[in-house]
Amino acid sequence: MPLPADYHMHTPLCRHAKGEPTEYAARAIKAGVPEIGFSDHSPMREDDFDEWRMRASELTEYAGKVEQARLDHPDLPIRFGLEVDFLPGQEPWIREMADLHDWDYFIGSVHYVGDWVIDNPTTLNRWRDRDTIEVWSAYFKNLTDAAATGLFQIIGHADLPKKFGFVPDEDCTPLYRNFLTACADTETCVELNTAGLRKECTEIYPHPNILKLARQLGVQITFGSDAHAPHEVGADLDQAVTLARECDYETCCRFEKRQKSVIAI
Ligand code: ZN
Ligand code: FE
Ligand code: FE
Ligand code: ZN
């Protein structure tokens, strides 16, 4: 099947990914991915915020690496974006970053609940110490607020809390509905992210129940491998397209300078 654009990939600037953007681009061409976009972990205003993102002073270097990939692979459309961490109160900083470069899109992602990075394997114990539903509720509250800002073209890995298999017994439909209503209101896309297949949960983010509800509410989609190394570019995007179609999607979105266009899948 023809693969969609892969809009979620990282660079070594975030300190936990390998390979230069030009190598990711070369791999995309080999794997038959028709378009890619870089979305490395955005800087925070404070460079010592945490250890897994680029520094604010490195944004220019990031732009240069992506530009090099474009020069080396002129026939591959290469988009320039960021995976922006949404935490309450970050909106002014996100607006400042948006003005710094000619971005094609921002992926808004939530990794933090309070001061805890919920997908960090070294803090797995905190999952055991807390009520799963309480963490999911807090997570989806942040995600809903992120979508409601309208600052993001795409929301990344919407049910990331399932990563290690901590899934609540309770019905989460109300959490999903609040979140997806905010996406619909702001015309923010939801990303099908295949990294979940490579984690303990062994599922694409988000779950089919979320995608089906998204489809009902008129929320559009994009695709991403969340590659942290060149060999992961385009990983399992065929499975993600199959899932999207099973959830009644017939189109996905592309972004150029934050302008959306719709293409068939
Ligand atoms: Zn990462
Ligand atoms: Fe992420
Ligand atoms: Fe990512
Ligand atoms: Zn990510």
Image (tube, rainbow, N blue to C red):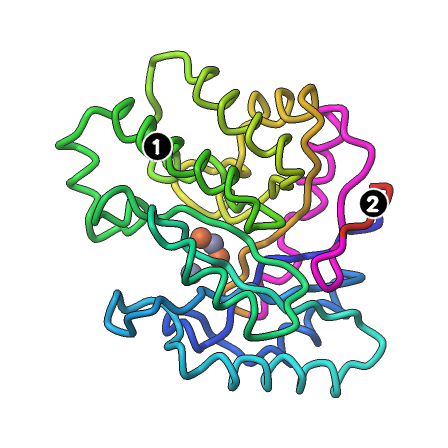
Residue under label 1, please give it.
165
Q: Is residue 84 above or below residue 251?
A: below
- The mark closer to the camera, 2 or 1, is 2
Closer-to-camera residue (114/160) = 114
> Circle 2 — which element?
strand
> Where, quadrant-wise, is the C terminus in this rendering?
top right
Rendered residue at 44%/37% (across/down): 145
**Beta carbon at label 2 within 8 Å of ligand 3:** no
Disc assigned to residue 97: none
How crowded is the residue under tag 2: few (<14 C-alpha within 10 Å), some, or many (20+)? Answer: some
Instruction: Give the magenta part as a residue range.
Output: 230-259
| CB contact under 8 Å: marks 2 and 1 | no
**Relative horizontal placement of residue 166, taking residue 72 as reference (left or right):** left
Question: Does residue 170 appear to the left or right of 74 in the view shown?
Answer: left
Question: In this rendering, is residue 260 above or below 32?
Answer: above
Q: Write the residue at 61% across / 39% down.
A: 190
Q: Quadrant of residue 65?
A: bottom right
At a point 66% along the width and 64% down the height, the residue shown is 37
Please say if 139 is above or below 261: above
Q: Position of residue 49 (x, y in %)?
A: 25, 66
x, y percent for residue 178: 49, 23
Residue type at mark 1? Gly
Q: Residue at x 60, y 47 (%)?
A: 154
Q: Tally the marks.
A: 2
Quarter occupied by residue 51: bottom left
Comparing 149 with 87, the one in front is 149
Residue 48 sits inside the magenta stretch: no
* Amino acid under disc 2: Val
Q: Residues within 10 Å of mark 1 (few under 14, many from 20)?
A: few
Disc 2: which residue: 262
Pick the residue in front: 248 or 54. 54
Ligand 2 lies under 8 Å from the Cβ of mark 1 = no
